[in-house]
Image (tube, rainbow, N blue to C red):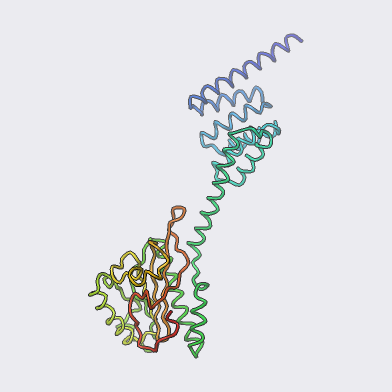
Amino acid sequence: MAESEAAAGSAGAAEASLKDKGNEFFKAGNYLKAAALYTQAIKQDPQNPALYSNRAAAFLHLVKLSKALADAETTITLNPQWEKGYFRKGCVLESMERYDEALAAFETAMRYNPQSSEVTKKIKRLNQLVRDKKRDQEVENLRSNVQMAKHLEPLKSELSGKYGQKEGWEEVLSFVIETLETAVKSWHDTSKVDPRVYFLLDKEKTDTEKYAPVVNIDKAFESPHTHSSCFPFLRQYSEDSFSKAACVVAPKSIISYPQVWKGQGSRKWKHGQNDGFFVQFECPSTRKLWFIPSSTERGKTLCRDPVELDVSAHELLPRLFRGKHSSSEK
């Protein structure tokens, strides 16, 4: 009996020695050697949860996350009342960016040791990471799912009331929606849009070899002179090409003239120094103007909802179509 007890004591001392040596290597930053020593200790004492907990920490530093998670789970199985197993599990899951599961593990650890400042800090950090991850996904969804139709219901009602034929107003509305969505996607991808006028050409009347659906106007807003020269050309272009409608797209940053957010227009300008771009819609019966503000959120460029402006106060260009003045100019 004495020999048996002596042998057990000798094995325990050896296991303790291996663990202590592992701890020394861990503190020195040699996690690979520490893990190897913990493994040797586990072979001598496979029911010791502290050894699995320590090896889980070493594996975590070595970024062997699957092995670290397995050891954390074994720690919990061997001692379900010990908060350290749940803490190790939470740390591994955090590294895997499985934040919701990590938070649940840390909360379980807190139940077993409510006084742990280490666990409290982790829970606070994880709550913030969960919120950030959720907002990251929301921002990405807003950037990838660009849907302008819901913002153009007033225009839809106005056009449907003015066009006698259903096909006429639906074609114009689709043109405006497509122009806005293309501009927003470009802004999301490159943080810019090119200053252009998009024309809705008449499929039957337009000479498409002579007239293109897009005209670049990158010089139009440089000065009063370039602005006044551009406008007559665009008006004539819209007539000669038999265009049904047009959309002027221009980033705010390139507009030296007219700076419609200053001067008289400043009284109705509600967007401060926000960056963004303008879209001015023109057709014979209706004119509209929107400003699409832009901001940076979670490191991503994000367009906000289009805001309709008073076209009479903020127009980028005078009326392009020779049509009757509409009461919608507000």
Residue 106 in picture, x, y percent from top left: 62, 39
Residue 57 in picture, x, y percent from top left: 56, 32
Residue 109 in picture, x, y percent from top left: 65, 36
Q: Is residue 200 above or below residue 258?
A: below
Residue 67 in picture, x, y percent from top left: 58, 36
Locate residue 255: give its quadrant: bottom left
Image quadrant in which the C terminus is located: bottom left
Closest to the observer, 297 or 324: 324
Closest to the observer, 247 or 33: 247
* Residue drawn at (52%, 76%) of the image: 153
- Of all residues shown, which one is farthest toward the top? 2
Horizontal side of 134 relative to 189 (left or right) equals right
Horizontal side of 4 relative to 328 (left or right) equals right
Q: Is residue 113 above or below residue 226?
A: above
Q: Is residue 1 above or below residue 41?
A: above
Q: Is residue 150 above or below residue 120?
A: below
- Of all residues shown, which one is farthest toward the right? 1
